[in-house]
Image (cartoon, rainbow, N blue to C red):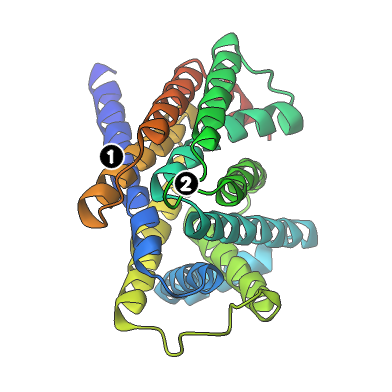
């Protein structure tokens, strides 16, 4: 039993490190893909990830789709829509604010999961989770106070906050479908749905189909990397891990994404955070960590 627990602990640590590193590349790669429109970046990353996953085993994917009920298919489409809007808001917000601010605010994702678990699964937050929400909210307010300095804009901050709330809903959909589909098939279908929704939104998005055509080589490389690393590796790993690991362990990826992304952005893109952004990020990370360590989400696994 002790050996089995050690293996489980090692596996959990390996997952957290791998997924954190994969997600940490997301913000810097998206910033590097400029001047391509954020919606095109979002579409490219999910479309390429969907194609890669689908081509691995088309027959298995077709069998999985055929076995779904009409309600389950609608739930998959709903998850795809949530993921599409999540990516669109995050990448658009990232384009309109500083890298450090966007990556700090995305650490609110575990708290969005806590709130959605409370609303949809009646899992009341623990005292630690409540304290974490208050701390993280205070950190978000601190970050907002830094708007106007450099690239930091409040409009972009609000978009990223919206993306974090949608992530909590997206996880709720994934929880409801965890027994209906294998993890890989679920990811392929959700990415495909998200790509279709984003493709439909492109003509209506201001400036999305204008400007750079074809995109510069560096942007193409960045979008392909976004599809392979944070999407195909990061998001798919999280979806698979959420089926067999405690949600508290899975949620540890979010603070790792923030810390890693800020370091990568500073070293690679010279995106140095301001003192206010550092202070706000620190408070958010403390709040997220407090909430994760005192998480009651493990009880929610059996509620869906």
> Which residue is drawn at the image coordinates 47% and 36% (left, top)?
107
> Which residue is drawn at the image coordinates 20% and 50% (left, top)?
267
> Which residue is drawn at the image coordinates 72% and 62% (left, top)?
73
Q: Could you tell me residue 280's position as x and y percent?
A: 45, 29
**Which quadrant would the C terminus be assigned to in this image?**
top right
User: Dot 2: few (<14), some (14–19), or many (≥20) neighbours within 10 Å?
Assistant: many
> Which residue is drawn at the image coordinates 43% and 50% (left, top)?
98
| Tag 1 secondary structure | helix
Q: Could you tell me residue 273's position as x and y percent?
A: 34, 41
Q: Residue furthest right?
A: 71
User: Dot 1: few (<14), some (14–19), or many (≥20) neighbours within 10 Å?
Assistant: some
Which numbered circle lies on residue 102? Answer: 2
Query: Which label sits in the foreground, 1 or 2?
Result: 2
Which numbered circle lies on residue 17? Answer: 1
Query: Is any part of residue 267 visible from this angle?
Result: yes
Question: Left or right: 48 with respect to 196?
Answer: left
Q: Between residue 127 and residue 27, name the one nearer to us.
A: 27
Q: Could you tell me residue 287's position as x and y percent?
A: 48, 21
**Which quadrant would the N terminus be assigned to in this image?**
top left
Counting the numbered discs, the total is 2
Query: Is any part of residue 243 visible from this angle?
Result: no
In the image, is residue 102 above or below residue 124? below
């Amino acid at each position: 039993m002790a050996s089995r627990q050690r293996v489980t602990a090692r596996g959990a640590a390996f997952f957290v490190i791998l997924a954190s590193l994969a997600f940490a590349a997301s913000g810097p790669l998206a910033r590097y893909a400029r001047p391509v429109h954020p919606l095109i970046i979002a579409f490219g990353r999910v479309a390429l990830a969907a194609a890669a996953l689908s081509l691995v085993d088309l027959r298995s994917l077709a069998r999985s789709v055929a076995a779904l009920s009409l309600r389950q298919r609608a739930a998959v489409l709903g998850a795809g829509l949530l993921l599409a809007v999540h990516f669109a808001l995050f990448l658009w917000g990232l384009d309109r604010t500083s890298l450090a601010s966007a990556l700090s605010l995305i650490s609110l994702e575990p708290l969005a999961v806590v709130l959605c678990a409370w609303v949809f699964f009646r899992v009341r937050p623990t005292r630690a989770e409540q304290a974490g929400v208050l701390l993280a909210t205070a950190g978000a307010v601190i970050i907002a106070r830094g708007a106007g300095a450099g690239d930091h804009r409040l409009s972009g901050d609000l978009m990223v906050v919206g993306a974090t709330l949608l992530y909590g809903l997206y996880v709720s959909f994934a929880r409801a479908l965890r027994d209906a589909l294998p993890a890989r098939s679920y990811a392929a279908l959700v990415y495909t749905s998200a790509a279709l929704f984003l493709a439909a939104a492109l003509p209506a998005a201001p400036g999305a189909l204008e400007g750079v055509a074809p995109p510069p080589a560096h942007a193409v490389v960045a979008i392909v990397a976004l599809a392979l690393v944070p999407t195909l590796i990061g998001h798919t790993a999280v979806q698979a891990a959420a089926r067999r690991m405690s949600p508290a362990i899975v949620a540890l990826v979010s603070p790792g994404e923030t810390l890693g992304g800020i370091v990568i952005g500073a070293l690679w893109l010279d995106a140095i955070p301001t003192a206010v952004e550092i202070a706000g990020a620190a408070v958010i990370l403390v709040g997220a960590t407090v909430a994760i360590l005192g998480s009651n989400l493990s009880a929610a696994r059996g509620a869906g």
